[in-house]
Amino acid sequence: LAHRGYILENYPEGILMPGERRPTLTRSKGIHDLTALERFQLADALKNNVLTIKSIPTLDARQSLAKSRAPVIVGEAPTAHSPHTHSRRVFANGRIDRRGLTRLGNASTS
């Protein structure tokens, strides 16, 4: 993604990120690491344009992606009830952090 100048936005929160390992496996097998439900949710996010692919047009921004200064995948914001304050991000070098989008506010007002 980084070398082609693309990023994924709103990657579903409850699904393993590319490069992330399921604790029960000794090595990653790509899409096969996902459960059938996770594969369905990922396909559904793509079909419904929740998970989007964005083109990065400028050379400087592409270089930031390739040098892992900017994320190539940004997860969707955690729900209001999530224990996480920010979404996950994945960088070209494989690093994953939780410094992405801020947790959604509580939808109900009392």
Image (cartoon, rainbow, N blue to C red):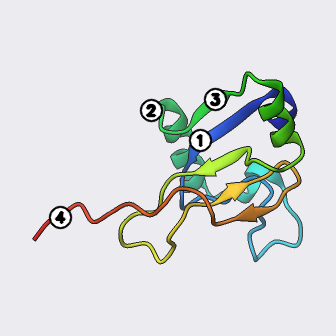
Q: Are marks 3 and 1 in contact (CB under 8 Å)?
A: yes
Query: In what element is the residue under mark 2?
Result: loop
Q: How many angstroms separate mark 3 from mark 1 (CA)? A: 7 Å
Q: Calculate the distance from the C-alpha at mark 4 to the C-alpha at mark 2.
A: 25 Å
Q: Which residue is mark 3?
A: 54
Crowding near pointer 3: few (<14 within 10 Å), some, many (20+)? few
Residue 95 in the image: x percent, y percent? 81, 61
- Answer with mark 3 or mark 1, whichever residue precedes in sequence: 1
Toward the viewer: 92 or 102?
102
Residue type marked 2: Asn
Q: How many marks?
A: 4
Eye-nearest disc, 4 or 2: 4
Left or right of 106? Residue 30 is right
Label 4 Cα crowd, 10 Å radius (few <14 / some 14-19 / many 20+)? few
The structure residue drawn at horizontal position 79% and vertical position 52%, both measured from the top left corner, is 91
Depth check, front residue: 42 or 49: 49
The residue indicated by pointer 4 is: 108
Q: Which mark is residue 48?
A: 2
Q: Earlier in the sequence, mark 4 or mark 3?
A: 3
Secondary structure, mark 4, is loop
Q: Are marks 4 and 1 in contact (CB under 8 Å)?
A: no
Separation (CA) of disc 4 from disc 3: 32 Å
